[in-house]
Image (tube, rainbow, N blue to C red):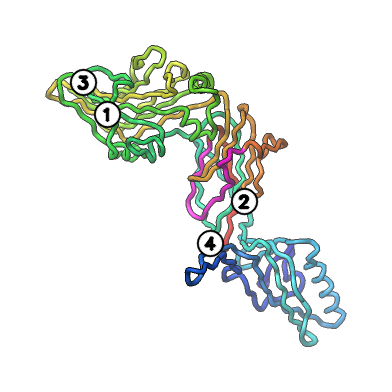
Amino acid sequence: MSWGFSYNGIHSTSKGLRISNIQGRDTLPDIESRTAQTPSKSGVHYFGSRFMERRITVEINLFGASLSEFRTKIRDLAAWLNPNNGPQELIFDDETDKKYFAVVTGNTDFEGIFVKRVAEIEFLCPDPFAYAISETDATFTNNAVKINNNGTAETFPIIEITADGTAKPDNFKGKTRGSTAENPHITMLSGLTSLTSPSQFNYEAPQSYIDNLEKQDLLASVYSRTGSGEIAQWMFSFNLIALIKRKFGFTVPGANHGEQVQWLKDNISEIVLRWYGKASGPSGNLASLTLWRGDTLAWYTPARTHTSSTISSIVFNTAATNAFIDSDGFTHGLAYAEASYGTTASVVETDYVELEVTLSGIGGIKVSNGDEFIALTRTFTTGDKIKIDNQVGTVVLNGTTDIITSLDMESDFFSIKPGENTLESGGGTGTVTYTKRWL
């Protein structure tokens, strides 16, 4: 088959055309730069730019054995290229995995001799990007999905979430020692001779220790105590009110702090603390992990343990969430080692720690791509289906109900940038559908 293009599902060769030249695909479309002049400065201020429409010119050759045959073919071409049908898919044979949306514009009159006529077809692409022929789907796993967009332009995804009250765990990423602005959680160290209550901890872990907590990478920080009876203890305190806002995108309801804490106790159905590390003492390797009981004001016993000499995980999960939320709205976890005898140190090493909560009362849904996010602040029921179209800017509940008014004020419809993107969901899981684009 001769080289050519398809337009509106019909290939050019079926119309008796041969292509001799194409212009307009190999460079950027026209660019409109936003600038402003100021009296006190030479040149202009630059405020960014945008791409204008793309124009693709195709030089075609039409062959015919008689004038009447030419007229018949030209009439057929006119019907095929009629712009009244609006933009249609335009696909070239050298890039069959990409399509433009184009409409014919300008003069297409033929010139030439009896057996050969030549004309130029100018296609106007109101949207200057080339699109992948088919969509790409990705599925959230554990409330996150990694997308490698190998197109050269950003694209706007359609996200479908089914509400289930789950969110990706929170951790100490971005934490600055002495500040709760960047990250609301706190990690403290103690070497007392008995397990230390949260209020007794008075030494915040150094910044280098906090930095090592950001990810699970086997780079553990080491805290040791050598005094007789001293216990190396490392506490991780998670602000649940802030965690809900960070991961689910809504503010915990309540007229005051006490009501907000009660909401946490009524609506958090599961707490899961995961700690990765190891510990050692006079008897060998023994690492323990426990949670603070806000009801009895004591650390839960028996603690969860492991005896590995290498960094391993301990998971403390509970559905008895009321007991493990204190009056300030915190959940406190404690990793500790066996007490020192004065000669052999008590040592606890932490590589990574995270806290995951599941909600029974789903007060919101949040989907984020880095710092950009969509947050919906309304009550959802498990099984509700939410469709977020970032291209057209719509949010629909269960296929029919427009809930755009539920958007949090800081929300913004976001794109998937070229390269690697990590999307996270809070309040539910589902799928992402997007079409790759190229300049």
Instruction: Give the residue type that dot 3 points to.
Output: Ala
Q: Are marks 4 and 1 in contact (CB under 8 Å)?
A: no
Residue 38 visible in the snapshot: yes
Q: In the drawing, does residue 302 fall left or right of residue 401?
A: left
> Which one is closest to the eye, mark 3 or mark 1?
1
Q: Main secondary structure of the magenta part?
A: loop
In front here: 246 or 107? 246
Distance from the alpha carbon under mark 2 to that under mark 1: 53 Å
Please state, as top left, top right, bottom left or bottom right, where the N terminus lies in the image: bottom right
Whichever of callouts 2 and 3 sits on the residue coming sooner in the sequence is 2
Instruction: Give the residue type that dot 2 points to.
Output: Glu
Question: What residue does disc 2 label?
Answer: 135
Q: Residues within 10 Å of mark 4 (few under 14, many from 20)?
A: few
Question: What residue does disc 4 label?
Answer: 47
> Which one is closest to the eye, mark 2 or mark 1?
1
Distance from the alpha carbon under mark 3 to that under mark 1: 19 Å
Question: What residue does disc 3 label?
Answer: 339
Whichever of callouts 4 and 2 sits on the residue coming sooner in the sequence is 4
Residue 215 visible in the snapshot: no
Instruction: Give the residue type that dot 4 points to.
Output: Phe
Q: Residues within 10 Å of mark 2 (few under 14, many from 20)?
A: few
Whichever of callouts 4 and 3 sits on the residue coming sooner in the sequence is 4
> Which one is closest to the eye, mark 4 or mark 1?
4
Of helix, strand and loop, which one carries label 2? loop
Magenta residues (range): 407-425
> Which one is closest to the eye, mark 4 or mark 2?
4
